[in-house]
Amino acid sequence: MNTFYTYHLRPGYGSDKLLLEFFINNPDSGFEKDLLDTLQEIRPNIEHVDDMWMNDEILLTISCDKGTFLYSKDIWGFAFIMAEQNQPCIIAIDAILNKSPLFQKEEVDYAIYKTPRN
């Protein structure tokens, strides 16, 4: 199967903290299973689930061998992995995803995520 998920390693808007942004074309694609299976070498474990129904979003707190990170998925086909206080975890996850045939990284210009100064 030639299916893969596209993602960006990029800073948050107006931030120097990196995050991973995923683009999920088919919400029933099994993305979460594929992601967690791909990350098995760092042994991810879902610690807490928040249903952010007012934002149409689910937020998971996940612990792993590299520390803790947040996974957010919304109804519009976007998902994010964030760890503002644990940037080495983001870099480690990116390295794992880069080795997987299920994930394709698209390079982005970090400058477009800066906010203008007033």
Image (cartoon, rainbow, N blue to C red):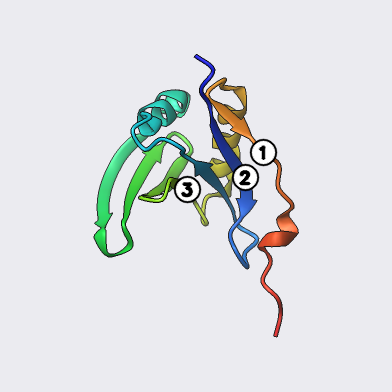
Name the residue located 71 percent from the left edge and 80 percent from the top edge. Answer: 117
Q: Earlier in the sequence, mark 1 or mark 3?
A: 3
Q: Amino acid under label 3?
A: Phe
Which label sits in the foreground, 2 or 1? 1
Decide if residue 84 is on the left or right side of residue 54: right
- Measured from the top left, where is residue 48 in percent x and y? 26, 47
Q: Residues within 10 Å of mark 2 (few under 14, many from 20)?
A: many
Residue 38 lies, with reference to residue 21, above or below; the image says above
Q: Amino acid under label 1?
A: Glu
| Total tally of numbered discs in the picture | 3
- Quickly name the residue at label 2: 9
- Measured from the top left, where is residue 107 in percent x and y? 71, 42
Decide if residue 109 is on the left or right side of residue 102: right
Q: Earlier in the sequence, mark 3 or mark 2?
A: 2
- For residue 118, which quarter of the picture? bottom right
- Quickly name the residue at label 1: 106
Name the one closer to the observer, 80 or 4: 4
Residue 71 lies, with reference to residue 11, above or below; the image says above
Secondary structure at numbered mark 2: strand
- Quickly name the residue at label 3: 80
Name the residue located 40 percent from the left edge and 32 percent from the top edge. Answer: 31
